[in-house]
């Protein structure tokens, strides 16, 4: 046990949270700039929207690669390489003059930024004890949610008062600061076990039944939230006649519910294990999903019923994510990078699948398809934990 592990630094926790926030900042800050980019680069909306899809693809691929490579060669070296790619590609986004160039630079930016997202979680396993890991991940998730809440507002402010390239200038400064901060703050230990290849690392994870339970639990919870994000603006603005500002307040309310539940989870870790709390939170998620299905079947269309159900379902997603990753890192310490990368990549993939399913059955902006998909995701989230039966906690 190193001195750093015995006395975890608050500064280090903030740094790791800043690294996790690369994803939401790179995506959510960018959204308000899409119309301005389309006009400035003389492109159509579809081509600009494609930059988001390209970013998500690059982000997922990057996480699948950095994780196992970091298990073999160490976290810090891979983190520095990835952040350098992010910095250079962000600079490219600033000077780009054509939409095709922006698409390429956004792909490279995603591949680079993936290192920060996946390796920050793996570093938690390296730098903290098993008892501290779920608490640290919970705190990191709270800070990430705050970044998710602030990012669109900050992006809108920049676009309104400056040029859309101002968003990338902000990201450039942010990434440079995190890169230098990481260089002088993170002292990641070298792998203490015999290095194995990427295929062997993935085999160790994919053949572990318990790992599948935690990854699927996390993925279904996250995917259900993406189903909500996909449909909710149409439901509340067009079906319930909310103004865009009222919808923004509602979205912020759900982010705060994640922060509240995650804070409760962090405090409860003093008494309960991350595995026990995961089962409790997954149970709450399932109950919220069944409630949403019930109000749909019973045609209870008062908006307050929908808001309360979604608040609980969305609220526990942060705790489920933190506890799932904590358990994964505990049972597969030698494949921490591989596990983190695969788990986060799977959750984004599930988000894409469930978002698509919602759109297939979405009719007249009615909340029915959203509620049913969320219900199915919540039930599968809880049922996934059947794969973890027989797990012995130490």
Image (spheres, rainbow, N blue to C red):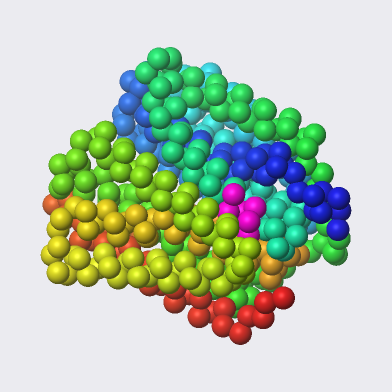
Res. 222 in view: no
Give, as a single range, the part of the protein colored magenta: 134-139
Q: Residue at x 80, y 53 (%)?
A: 5
Q: Residue at x 33, y 66 (%)?
A: 288
Quadrant of the rendered structure where residue 373 is?
bottom left
User: Which residue reaches farthest top?
Assistant: 162
The answer to if 211 sits in the magenta stretch is no
Query: Vertically, is 222 above or below 149?
Result: below
Where residue 181 sits in the image (x, y, percent)? 73, 32
The answer to if 136 sits in the magenta stretch is yes
**Mainly helix, strand or loop, the magenta region?**
helix
Where residue 58 sits in the image (x, y, percent)? 54, 45
Res. 300 in view: yes
User: If the image is split into quadrants, where does the C terminus sit?
Assistant: bottom right
Query: Vertically, is 164 above or below 28?
Result: above
Q: Residue at x 70, y 42 (%)?
A: 10
Query: Vertically, is 350 above or below 246?
Result: below
* Lateral position of residue 210 relative to residue 150, left or right: right
User: If the image is split into quadrants, where does the N terminus sit?
Assistant: bottom right
Quadrant of the rendered structure where residue 293 is?
bottom left
Task: Please state which of residues 60 and 213 is positioned toward the viewer in this rendering.
Answer: 213
Where residue 128 sits in the image (x, y, percent)? 75, 55
Q: Residue at x 57, y 35 (%)?
A: 109
Quadrant of the rendered structure where residue 154 is?
top left
Where residue 214 sits in the image (x, y, percent)? 55, 69
């Amino acid at each position: 046990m190193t001195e750093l592990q015995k006395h975890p630094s608050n500064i280090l926790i903030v740094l790791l949270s800043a690294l996790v926030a690369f994803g939401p900042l790179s995506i959510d800050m960018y959204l308000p700039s899409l119309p301005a980019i389309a006009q400035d680069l003389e492109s159509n909306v579809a081509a600009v929207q494609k930059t988001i899809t390209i970013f998500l693809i690059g982000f997922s691929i990057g996480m699948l690669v950095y994780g196992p490579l970091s298990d073999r060669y160490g976290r810090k070296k891979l983190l520095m390489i990835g952040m350098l790619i992010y910095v250079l590609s962000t600079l490219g986004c600033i000077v780009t003059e054509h939409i095709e160039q922006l698409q390429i630079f956004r792909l490279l930016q995603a591949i680079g930024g993936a290192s920060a997202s996946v390796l920050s979680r793996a570093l938690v396993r390296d730098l903290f004890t098993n008892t501290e890991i779920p608490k640290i991940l919970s705190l990191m998730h709270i800070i990430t949610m705050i970044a998710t809440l602030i990012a669109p507002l900050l992006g809108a402010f920049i676009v309104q008062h400056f040029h859309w390239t101002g968003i990338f200038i902000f990201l450039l400064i942010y990434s440079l600061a995190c890169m230098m901060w990481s260089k002088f703050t993170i002292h990641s230990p070298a792998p203490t076990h015999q290095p194995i290849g990427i295929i062997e690392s993935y085999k160790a994870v994919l053949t572990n039944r318990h790992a599948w339970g935690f990854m699927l639990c996390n993925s279904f919870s996250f995917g259900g939230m993406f189903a909500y994000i996909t449909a909710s603006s149409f439901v509340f603005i067009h079906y319930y006649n909310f103004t865009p500002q009222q919808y923004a307040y509602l979205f912020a309310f759900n982010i705060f519910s994640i922060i509240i539940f995650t804070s409760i989870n962090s405090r409860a870790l003093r008494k309960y294990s991350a595995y026990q709390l995961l089962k409790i939170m997954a149970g709450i998620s399932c109950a919220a999903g069944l409630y949403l299905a019930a109000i749909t079947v019973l045609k209870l269309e008062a908006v307050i019923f929908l808001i309360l159900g979604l608040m609980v379902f969305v609220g526990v997603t942060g705790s489920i994510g933190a506890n799932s990753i904590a358990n994964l890192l505990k049972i597969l310490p030698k494949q921490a990078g591989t596990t983190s990368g695969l788990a986060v990549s799977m959750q984004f993939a599930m988000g894409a699948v469930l978002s698509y399913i919602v759109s297939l059955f979405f009719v007249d902006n009615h909340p029915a398809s959203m509620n049913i998909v969320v219900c199915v995701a919540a039930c599968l989230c809880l049922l996934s934990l059947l794969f973890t039966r027989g797990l012995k906690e130490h």
